[in-house]
Image (spheres, grey):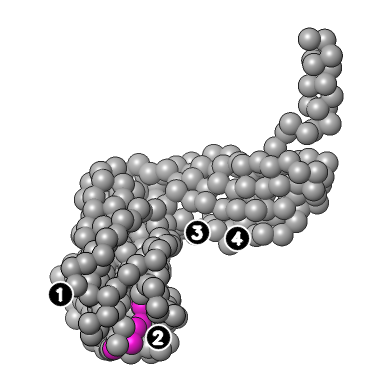
């Protein structure tokens, strides 16, 4: 027993049992968070060990939380500031918690996982509909974005810009507490395209409102999917599911090899038939707020997978 205690004491003294990379602050109270504007904060990664450490992985509790990921090495005693962005446009009013987990490994073979946590109370005076725009299409499309301000003196939209090439706001209409924008999304080359529509307003507290836009552009001869976009919605914490039918052109049998879920947490099951079709069930436990991802459906005999947008809306 004494020998074992002596070994443990030596490990603690050398720092071998301590977490190499820690997060500061471990918990952050954000107070009142306005729904609409992106919230920007910083966390610090610090290597408190005696060996160089490699950041090996990042996970967040919500698709609305993103970090400027750093996958490099931290020398002993070195710190790195990590910018964070919380997209608040789709979050329901009330208390929220956002968690970020960072995995690391040192050059001696040790592995650690540390988490940071932010809490706040979301206040909704301004609504954006939709809070994000996710499309699957092979052609140009037109959409309506609604900004609704319930306050006595509503804000006005004074301008806009976009980071998605070809996206254009064609018309703006304002009536009372609502502003409606007509948005044209162009036909794009095959593949996944991501950007944002960024609105400028007359209210300093809501100076910029950002709507993420994701377009999965496909060929006319690709696999047909019904629906072409899956939206799972309901009270946060409940389990919801949806069936999707995939149909191949012609009489070729459609055989799914694998489905990868990207950007959100969900599970899938699939079955062949009938005929040249296959059925996929998508299921998730809804997180609070709105987040977007996609299913990457790998099909036997096809070089390119089928891409299906997936949106989660927990109220």
- In the image, residue 282 lies at what x, y percent? 28, 57
Q: Which element is circle 3 on?
A: strand
Viewer-closest of 166 and 43: 166
Name the secondary structure under disc 2: loop
In 3D space, how far apart are the residues under numbered discs 1 and 3 (Cα atoms)?
A: 35 Å
- Check disc 4 and report the residue beneath it: 69
- Mark number, residue 278: none
User: N-terminal of the two: label 1 or label 4?
Assistant: 4
Mark number for residue 66?
A: 3
Question: Where is residue 171 drawn, in percent x and y?
Answer: 23, 86
Where is residue 161, by image quadrant? bottom left
Query: Magenta residues, as a range?
Result: 215-220
Residue pointed to by mark 1: 175
Distance in Å between CA atoms under marks 3 and 2: 26 Å
Choose the circle earlier in sequence order: 3 or 2.
3
Q: Nearer the viewer, mark 4 or mark 2?
A: 2
Q: Is residue 219 magenta?
A: yes
Instruction: Name the residue rendered at 60%, 53% in the picture.
Output: 57
Q: Nearer the viewer, mark 3 or mark 2?
A: 2
Viewer can see residue 160: no
Who's the residue at 76% across and 43% down the image? 109
Q: Find numbered disc 4 in the image and state the secondary structure of the residue it sits on.
A: loop
First in sequence, mark 4 or 2: give its number: 4
| Local secondary structure at mark 1 | strand
Give me the C-alpha separation between circle 4 and circle 2. Answer: 27 Å
Q: Is residue 42 left or right of residue 315?
A: right
In the picture, measured across the screen, residue 299 lies left or right of residue 172, that is right
Within-10-Å neighbours for mark 3: few <14, some 14–19, many 20+:
some
Between 147 and 247, the residue placed more toward the observer is 247
Q: To which residue does mark 2 refer?
A: 190
């Amino acid at each position: 027993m004494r020998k074992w205690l002596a070994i443990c004491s030596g490990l603690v003294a050398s720092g071998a049992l301590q977490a190499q990379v820690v997060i500061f602050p471990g918990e952050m109270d954000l107070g009142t968070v306005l729904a609409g504007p992106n919230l920007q904060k910083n966390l610090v990664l610090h290597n408190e060990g005696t060996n160089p450490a490699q950041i090996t992985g990042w996970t967040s509790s919500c698709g609305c939380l993103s970090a400027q990921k750093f996958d490099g090495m931290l020398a002993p005693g070195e710190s790195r500031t990590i910018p964070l962005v919380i997209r608040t446009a789709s979050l329901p009013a009330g208390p929220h918690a956002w968690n970020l987990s960072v995995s690391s490994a040192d050059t001696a073979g040790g592995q650690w996982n540390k988490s940071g946590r932010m809490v706040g109370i979301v206040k909704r005076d301004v609504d954006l509909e939709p809070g994000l725009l996710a499309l699957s299409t092979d052609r140009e499309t037109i959409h309506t974005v609604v900004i609704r301000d319930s306050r006595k003196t509503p804000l006005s939209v004074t301008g806009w810009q976009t980071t998605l090439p070809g996206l254009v706001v064609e018309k703006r209409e304002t009536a009372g507490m609502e502003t409606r924008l007509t948005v044209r999304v162009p036909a794009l080359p095959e593949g996944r395209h991501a950007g944002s529509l960024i609105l400028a307003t007359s209210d300093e507290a809501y100076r910029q409102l950002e709507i993420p836009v994701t377009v999965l552009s496909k060929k006319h001869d690709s696999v047909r999917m019904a629906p072409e976009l899956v939206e799972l919605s309901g009270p946060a914490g409940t389990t919801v599911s949806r069936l999707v039918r995939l149909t191949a052109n012609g009489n070729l049998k459609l055989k799914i090899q694998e489905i990868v879920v990207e950007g959100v947490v969900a599970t899938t099951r699939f079955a062949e038939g009938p005929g040249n079709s296959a059925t996929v069930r998508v299921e998730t436990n809804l997180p609070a707020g709105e987040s977007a991802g996609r299913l990457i459906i790998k099909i036997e005999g096809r070089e390119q997978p089928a891409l299906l947008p997936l949106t989660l809306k927990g109220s």
